[in-house]
Amino acid sequence: MVSVIVQEAKIDQMQTALLVIGIFENERDFFKSKGLNSTITAAIIELIENKEFKRSFGSNIIFHMMGKGLIKKIMLIGLGTREKFTYENARIIAGKAALEAKELGVEEFCILPFMDVDEALIEAISEGVLLSLYTFNRYKTSGKQATTIPAQATIVVNSDSAKFQAVVDIVNLITQAVNYARDLSNLPPNECPPSQIASLALALDGEYGIKTRILERYEMESIGLNGIVSVGKGSNNPPKLIILEYYGNVDHHKPYLLVGKAVTFDTGGISLKPGDRMDEMKFDKCGGCSILGILKAIASLGLPVNVIGIIPSVENMPSSTSYRPGDIIRMYNGKTVEILNTDAEGRIILADAMAYGVAIFNPQAIIDLATLTGACVIALGANVAAVIGTSKYLAERLSKISEKTGERIWGLPLHDEYYEQIKSTVADLKNIGGRPGGAITAAAFLSNFTNDIPWVHLDIAGTAWTQEGTFERSYNPKGATGFGIRTVVKFLMEVPNK
Ligand code: BES
Ligand code: ZN
Ligand code: ZN
């Protein structure tokens, strides 16, 4: 695995196999602030004047220094125009540079920050490097050794290296948690039934003070978690309810409750999905895996907050023991739900888990993460998650933070009228509300189980893995993205300790 470090140094003194220099378009004096020597500067000017290096966003060129000085090779990478350059762009460019370095087979490389250095820039660059070099290759039996991943990336700064190293240390822990969650999310469904999610969660028990508990099917039956039990009935792999507790704040302040959907495979059940792209439903566990990642991150950071993570995990299968359309389920909080489509299973397991979390832990706020609806992907595409809920504060905070993390989220409304769509004629609620506003009616369903505690739901159906319509992002390799972890962890780093 790559480690990122910050070093205070003059470029000429750096000994490196590859120096990465980002250059903006249309700037004549680009080299002024970079501290480059005359040989390097002359080479760059030549490449630009000959139009060999265009400086457009992401374009790059590599040249050898032929033994002049301590730098072996230089990679110039285009930054586009300075006015359009954002921290997200820095993350993408740093990721691209890291992937190029891997392609070149270098053991280490150095990066010059692309503009005036601040903490956010160092954060974005180190995230780009650490997230882009993630690979999921445990099922490849050959070709693994062919590419070496660089062992070290050095960000070269003029001053304050200790302050910036502290930023990178935090990024290291958070991206480790993201890559950990990606690893779990990418597991194939045959190797990752609910019991596997449970044992992975149990492996976190004791790590930096996390406590993990698993509720088995018979316990869920006996306390009335009938939503989770019903959805899990069709599979030979029994459902699990995973509960993680982290108390970082000794003053026993009310915890934050994080709930994540972990359907290890969603066939749709009796309301069977069409075969096309059904394999992608192995990613229907991403919300739950993100909760594991968030707990791992906040615990390793030792954040002074109290957090409960609850992960209902089931496999949604069609069989003679499956729940059916027409069934009426009495949920943990006593409300009754008429099932009209067994493919709308996520809201049922989440609802039970939230009602349980509210009753047992009396949280100050609830955030849930779920690959909940195809409708969300239709509404916002595959690059933006929906935030829907009853807490304007939570929605605004998360949206604001997401502008910095690059994990785009956008608010959808939850007006009273949407609740009409999920009223049942025979029970309190029905589990589908028709096609109009499908992502919203799913959230309206969930809000029946929050007991009016401030809550937001993140629908990550489009963003949890790279899929049709996903924009190319160097730092999101194919497969699970770990979407939401960085944003929620940032939120928990910022919340007032009360
Ligand atoms: N896991 C799916 C949602 C999903 C679909 C996520 C496609 C990502 C990509 C969820 O359980 C589901 O099947 N939802 C149904 C609800 C419908 C029956 C009301 C859907 O969105 O089609
Ligand atoms: Zn489904
Ligand atoms: Zn699902």
Image: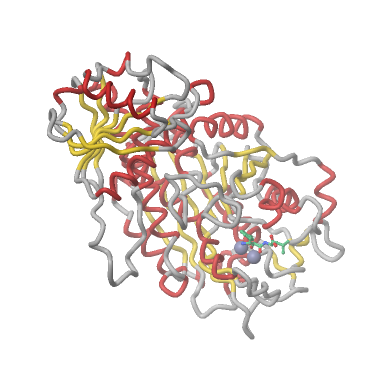
Q: Quadrant of ligand 2?
A: bottom right
Kindly identify the residue that appears in the image at 55 percent across and 47 percent down. Answer: 471
Residue 86 is left or right of residue 248, and the answer is: right
- Front residue (pair 337, 367): 367
Give the residue furthest to the front.
50
**Vertically, is 324 above or below 457?**
below
Give the residue furthest to the bottom.
320
Kindly identify the residue that appears in the image at 41 percent across and 64 percent down. Answer: 198
Q: Quadrant of residue 169?
A: top left
- Front residue (pair 199, 134): 134
Kindly identify the residue that appears in the image at 58 percent across and 53 percent down. Answer: 370
Percent position (x, y) of residue 179? Answer: 37, 50
Give the residue furthest to the right.
425
Percent position (x, y) of residue 400? Answer: 56, 29
Percent position (x, y) of residue 437? Answer: 78, 50
Percent position (x, y) of residue 307? Answer: 45, 42
Residue 49 is left or right of residue 443, and the answer is: left
Kindly identify the residue that appears in the image at 33 percent across and 54 percent down. Answer: 204
